[in-house]
Amino acid sequence: MRSRFQARRPSPAMLVAITAVVLSLTGGAIAATIGSGDIKKNAVKSKHIKNGNGVKNKDIKNNNIKTGKIRNGTLLAEDFASNQLVKGDKGDKGDKGDKGDQGDPGTNGTNGTDGADATKLWASVASDGTLGKNSGATGSVRGSTGSYTVTFNQDITGCVYIATIGQDSTLLIPHMISTALTAPSTVRVRTADETANVDRDFYIAVFC
């Protein structure tokens, strides 16, 4: 006698349902590889960023990224904290560079104005008042013992007068000399020793 029950092939839906029940009961799992495209941008965060509840995210395990996971030549100096990179030894001096091109000529400066001519006023006067070698002197006169006047060919009111005793090998004691302006172009000269006026040769120069 033929059985009323005939074996039938299960449908695809039935197979999926049975597989799901078996996996749920046995704890089985299907491993999958997660690629870069499966992770949302900015989803992996630093452990230092806190979420809304104040709990630090730890999506990346501490000390889990090692040198083997970093492509050589991809880190920059700015990726490291201050003073973390060791300063290298000073390199060798480089070769001398090529001579540069000659620069353009500079602009000529403005010509300055001519300055005033310097005065050349000086005279050599003998002890008797005689005018000797000179420049710009018109005369000299001995008035009294040790008192002379020397006249120049221009106004010397704003000038400086310097006189020195002439050379005399017989002069053994200190002598003094003084000057004073007595007219716009005339200087009085007095020569003296430690006690009184004496006649002496002298030189006078005027600086304006």
Image: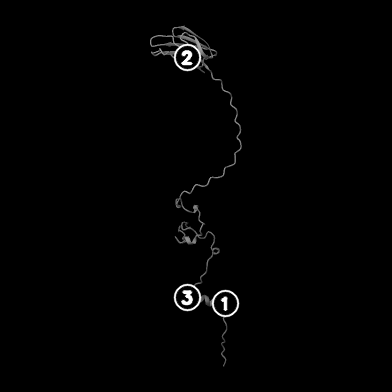
In the rendered structure, the answer to whether residue 117 lies left or right of residue 165 reads: right
- Residue 128: x and y, percent? 47, 8
On the image, numbered disc 3 is attached to which residue?
Answer: 26
Q: Residues within 10 Å of mark 3 (few under 14, many from 20)?
A: few
Residue at the top extreme, as displayed: 144
Q: Which mark is residue 13?
A: 1
Check disc 2: other Cα within 10 Å, few if <14, some if 14-19, many if 20+: some
Circle 2 sits on which residue?
203
Front-most of 180 and 18? Answer: 180
Q: Residue at x 49, y 61 (%)?
A: 69
Say which amino acid is labelled 2.
Answer: Tyr
Is residue 204 visible from the viewing direction of this image? yes
Task: For marks 1 and 2, give the one nearer the viewer.
Answer: 2
Name the image quarter holding residue 171: top left
Q: Amino acid at mark 3?
A: Thr
- First in sequence: mark 1 vs mark 2: 1
Q: Where's the N terminus, which quadrant? A: bottom right
Q: CA distance from mark 1 to mark 2?
A: 139 Å
Q: Position of residue 111 (x, y in %)?
A: 60, 27
Q: Secondary structure at mark 3?
A: helix
Above or below residue 119? Residue 198 is above
